[in-house]
């Protein structure tokens, strides 16, 4: 369950009904409470499709500054990128703007309801360079050796079987391709997100390097999140 916690123990009313419904949906995912075999971190529950309104909240730009994240990724026209765990498409449309008509964005999710919202958005905004598809827990179902960038925004920590997914994602990247995780900083206790929905640099490096990824750098330009770049 994804929930904001404010200083002093107060909890923001990010649509209480949404949070409750999300918790119910999340119980269908078997990963809740399991620990990663390498880092020992608790794998978080998946945010259900009822949380889509929270992803699209008007204050997200002010709180998380996603425009800064997109700029920091240095995405160029014509590139091929994937938005893994795309949800309602908040980042998908921004990626599409960057790659332009000559590029390609694969937007994938495991929840059919999220994919419905995503397809509606892509059609509404006429994003012909975006291809929407349903992934599996262990298979992103992306083309092999074609991606310049795989992006997961607040998603990796919820993967039910992260090791298997990472192995599959490696096969989709070009030789110089990047895997980028945007995750809430566990090192900063004041970041108002539940602990299991945060990740530290140490945890991310342990888990990804164990699967053959090379740590490139951390881009720390965001108020609440790390941008973690792997090759």
Image (cartoon, rainbow, N blue to C red):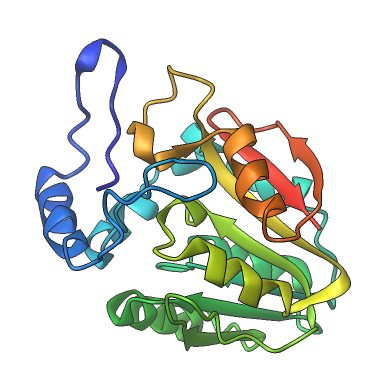
The image quarter in which residue 183 lies: top right
- Does residue 178 appear left or right of residue 21 in this picture? right
- Residue at the image position 18 percent from the left and 56 percent from the top: 22
Q: Could you say which is closer to the camera, residue 214 or residue 21?
A: 214
Q: Could you say which is closer to the camera, residue 170 or residue 15?
A: 170
- Residue at the image position 56 percent from the left and 35 percent from the top: 225
As drawn, which residue projects farthest toward the right? 176
Q: Could you say which is closer to the camera, residue 213 or residue 9?
A: 213
Q: Could you say which is closer to the camera, residue 159 or residue 10?
A: 159
Expressed as whole percent of the image width and height from the top left, the position of residue 66 reads: 59, 46
Expressed as whole percent of the image width and height from the top left, the position of residue 208 reads: 66, 53
- Does residue 214 appear left or right of residue 58 in this picture? right
Q: Quadrant of the C terminus?
A: bottom right
As drawn, which residue projects farthest toward the front? 37
- Does residue 95 appear left or right of residue 107 in this picture? right
The image quarter in which residue 168 lies: bottom right
- Figure check: 138 above or below 52: below
Expressed as whole percent of the image width and height from the top left, the position of residue 71 reads: 75, 48
The image quarter in which residue 46 lies: bottom left
Is residue 59 in view from this perspective?
A: no
- Residue at the image position 25 percent from the left and 65 percent from the top: 30
């Amino acid at each position: 369950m994804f929930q904001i916690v404010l200083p002093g123990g107060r909890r923001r009313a990010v649509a209480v009904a949404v949070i409750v419904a999300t918790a119910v949906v999340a119980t269908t995912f078997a990963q809740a409470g399991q620990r990663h075999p390498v880092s020992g971190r608790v794998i978080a529950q998946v945010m259900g499709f009822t949380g889509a309104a929270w992803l699209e909240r008007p204050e997200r730009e002010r709180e998380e500054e996603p425009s800064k994240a997109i700029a920091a990724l240095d995405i160029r026209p014509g590139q091929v990128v994937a938005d893994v765990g795309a949800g309602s498409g908040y980042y998908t449309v921004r990626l599409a703007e960057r790659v332009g008509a000559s590029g390609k964005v694969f937007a994938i999710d495991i929840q059919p309801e999220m994919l419905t919202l995503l397809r509606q958005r892509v059609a509404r905004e006429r994003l012909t360079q975006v291809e929407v598809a349903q992934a599996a827990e262990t298979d992103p179902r992306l083309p092999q050796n074609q991606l310049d960038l795989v992006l997961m925004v607040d998603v990796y920590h919820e993967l039910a079987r992260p090791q298997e997914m990472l192995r599959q994602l490696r096969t989709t990247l070009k030789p110089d391709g990047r895997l980028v995780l945007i995750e809430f900083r566990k090192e900063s206790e004041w970041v108002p997100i539940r602990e299991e929905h945060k990740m530290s640099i140490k945890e991310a490096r342990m888990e990804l390097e164990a699967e053959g990824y090379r740590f490139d750098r951390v881009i720390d330009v965001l108020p609440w999140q790390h941008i973690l770049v792997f090759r």
